[in-house]
Amino acid sequence: MSGIEELKKMIEESKRIVFLGGAGVSTESGIPDFRSENGIFKAIRDFGYPPETLLSRSFFDRHPDVFFKYYRTLLMSGDAKPNKAHYSLAKLERDGKLTAIATQNIDGLHQMAGSKNVYELHGSIKRNYCMRCHKFYDDEFIANCEGVPHCECGGIVKPDVVLYEEGLDTDTLMNAVKHISRADMMIVGGTSLQVYPAAGLIDYYRGSKLVLINKSSTPYDSYADLVINDSIGKVLEEAVGID
């Protein structure tokens, strides 16, 4: 039995699937990942800053002008559209198979594809808020501003993304843990499983159908019931199909 056929069989037998995804899900939509040769971290270093510095909360507070100059260029996904992986997962949810998505991505493409129950572990570029009055602003507001975006009340508008030195949202994290601990199948895709605490979520899975789909190996491969080293979009389209 091929890996795709085995994956199809697992999906057919499951009723509570959870998907945990990383940057590899979005690279197939043209969004660069963080740590590869052409990733965001290298681009930041080319501008003269360590990524952990420029993407930190303390740097944002001290130098918001510099932060937003690079944030608009490197982190905002522009006209990116959902790919086959996003649409396949949305179909699984509509079919009553998938109960939740926990994603490390901040691009909002899962929701754009139609997924409803999405836990964005690292926040979203689609949400932005005034640090003074908490008024909400969308990503177009940030994209169209020059320099540091300000609310009508005068406060700085901050993207609702998790920066270095900031913790993950407790409710988001606990809801992801709840769904993973109750899942009868867990699919992990497009992630090297090296970024914590997101990678540690896999430890809460108690079922017997752990599937890892990634182009390269991960530290958890030996624990998985099925490992497929291929494109996440290609694999999910073949296993699930798209309406």
Image (cartoon, rainbow, N blue to C red):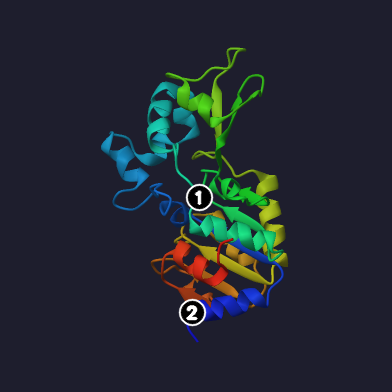
Q: Earlier in the sequence, mark 1 or mark 2?
A: 2
Is residue 225 visible from the viewing direction of this image? no
**Residue at (50% x, 20% y) in the render:** 149
* Above or below: residue 10 compared with residue 72: below
Secondary structure state at the residue bearing disc 1: loop
**Residue at (43% x, 50% y) in the render:** 29
Separation of marks 1 and 2 at Cα, in angstroms:
24 Å
Locate residue 160: give its quadrant.
top right
**Residue at (66% x, 24% y) in the render:** 134
Q: Which quarter of the rendered picture does the C terminus lie within?
A: bottom right
Is residue 96 visible from the viewing direction of this image? yes
**Residue at (48% x, 68% y) in the render:** 235
x and y percentages locating residue 141 in the rendered image: 53, 24
Mark 2 is surrounded, within 10 Å at the Cα level, by few (under 14), some (14 to 19) or many (20 or more) other residues, namely: some
Rendered image: mark on residue 230: none
x and y percentages locating residue 69 in the rendered image: 38, 26
Q: Nearer the viewer, residue 210 or 58?
A: 210
Q: Are marks 1 and 2 in contact (CB under 8 Å)?
A: no
Nearest-to-viewer mark from 1 and 2: 1
Q: Nearer the viewer, residue 122 or 56?
A: 122
x and y percentages locating residue 232 in the rendered image: 46, 63
Rendered image: mark on residue 82: 1
Q: Nearer the viewer, residue 26 or 158?
A: 26
Report whether 150 appears left or right of 31.
right
* Above or below: residue 232 compared with residue 113: below
Residue type beneath disc 2: Gly
* Above or below: residue 221 compared with residue 152: below
x and y percentages locating residue 182 in the rendered image: 73, 66
Q: Which residue position holds label 2?
A: 3
Q: Nearer the viewer, residue 234 or 135?
A: 234
Residue type beneath disc 1: Pro
